[in-house]
Image (cartoon, rainbow, N blue to C red):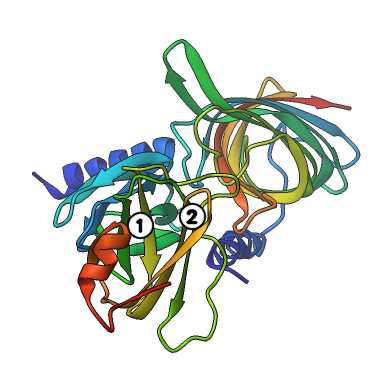
Amino acid sequence: MGTKNMRVLLAIVAIAASLTGCSQEGDLVVKNDATTEFEGYVEDQFVMIAPGEQYSTTIYIGKNFTLVGPTDIGVPISGSAWTKKSFSITMWVASGEQNTFTIDDDIGALDFKNNYSLSINEISVKMCDGTSFGSNLLEIGHKLAPGDEKLIQLSPGCWDVLVNYGREENLDTVTAITIDIGQVVEFPWDPDYVLSLGPPAAIKR
Amino acid sequence: MDSEMRKANLFVGIFLLCCISFAGSALGQAVQSQYVADFGAAFTQATVTKARMGFVGLDLQVGKMLTNNVSVGLSTGYDVVSMRKIGSVYERMGIIPILAKAKMYFTFAPLMQAHASLAGGVYQSVPHLDTDPIGGIWNSDIQPGGAAGIGFDYWFLGRQGIGAEFEYNFFDSGGDSPFSYFALRLNYSIIKI
């Protein structure tokens, strides 16, 4: 191709670009490195990502003309996992690049199950070295029926759990439950189960 | 000052440099105290986030020649700067500029003139959107802004001319970045004594 033809071609390309503007797109990868399933939204799209899996999408950024126009865009990502606190962030996606957001564990969890024959009225927790239990973790006016489960997200450390159950509002305390980041502790609670943990893990009141 | 505003100012600066030129008058061009009306049809394209393919703008400019080379006047129109069909719905972003415009003409050949323009005023956004805001704009609003343009005219039959111009418009979107779009316009011009 001669020089003249090359110039003509460049001119045509420049004119075409000026007519349309250049579309800008970038790839967004949300990778779940947490140990539990992530549920949330990526740019208003509901997604569920299993541990070790990833969600990929192409983000349309907009139109760019020479020096003017966007080359990146903020994409909202929000959600949580059992071992990931609820979060909401803006991930900047750059044109022509693969932009990766990684979800990592930042908390642990107690998978509390009511294995007893009576409903649970209240569940509260405190750090082992704390002096008093916090507020009720069940929703106001709700009880945890026999067989039902409640996920309790906890930061890493040693925890005590106070259970108020039955019409007589009996109290049961389970102590020294160790939670690590990314760990989900199965907790099929009933008074007998607590006793089976043995001292000093459980204190019966 | 964010990068988008710096880019906009760069464009304006380039146009101001264009004004360092020679004066003169072309055969058939408007001269001092005459009025010029430009009827334009343009391809208009938004250059912001989530903007889709541009569409058409129809514009009217009216100016009075203060000298043989400088005119001031008003400009308005309706520019569809983004358009997308989703199902049976056309998502579109319309802009109504209402601008005071100064234009400087440079004669470079008989019957031929180049021109550079600067304008300031307000922009009425008219969005018809369902999925994403374009350039951060969801709702109809009026915001201050400006425009800069370059182009040329070919005058014929004494009082008529045809020409083309490129105009870059920008205005406050109410968000982090200004809204911007360009217009590639064909003009039909009439000189009125």
| Residue toward you, B35 or B40 | B40
**Along the line of sight, which residue is nearer the eye, A137 or A118?**
A118
Q: Is residue A6 above or below residue B193?
A: below
Residue that label 2 marks: A68
Q: Amino acid at mark 1?
A: Val
The N terminus of chain B: image quadrant: bottom right
Q: Residue at x 52, y 23 (%)?
A: B91
- Disc 1 secondary structure class: strand
Q: Give the answer, above or below, for where B92 lies relative to B103.
A: above
Specify which label sits upstream in the sequence, 1 or 2. Answer: 2
Give the structural element (helix, strand or loop) at label 2. Answer: loop
Quote the CA–CA distance across marks 1 and 2.
17 Å
| Residue A171 place in picture, x, y as percent | 47, 65
Q: Quadrant of residue A177?
A: bottom left
Protein chain holding label 2: A
- Say which residue label 1 marks: A93
Q: Residue furthest top?
A: B88
- Location of residue B152 in the rendering, given as x and y in whole percent from the top left corner: 59, 40
Name which residue lies at 55% across and 26% down.
B92
Quarter residue B29 falls in: top right
- Percent x, y of residue A27: 26, 50
Q: Chain of mark 1?
A: A
Q: For the C terminus of chain B, give its image quadrant.
A: top right
**Residue A70: x and y, percent?**
45, 54
Q: Residues within 10 Å of mark 1 (few under 14, many from 20)?
A: many
Q: Could you tell whether A9 is left or right of B107 in the image?
A: left
Are the residues at dot 1 and dot 2 in contact (C-beta closer than 8 Å)? no
Does B127 appear above or below B148? above
Q: Which mark is residue A184?
A: none
Amino acid marked by disc 2: Val
Choose between A27 and A19: the one closer to the eye.
A27
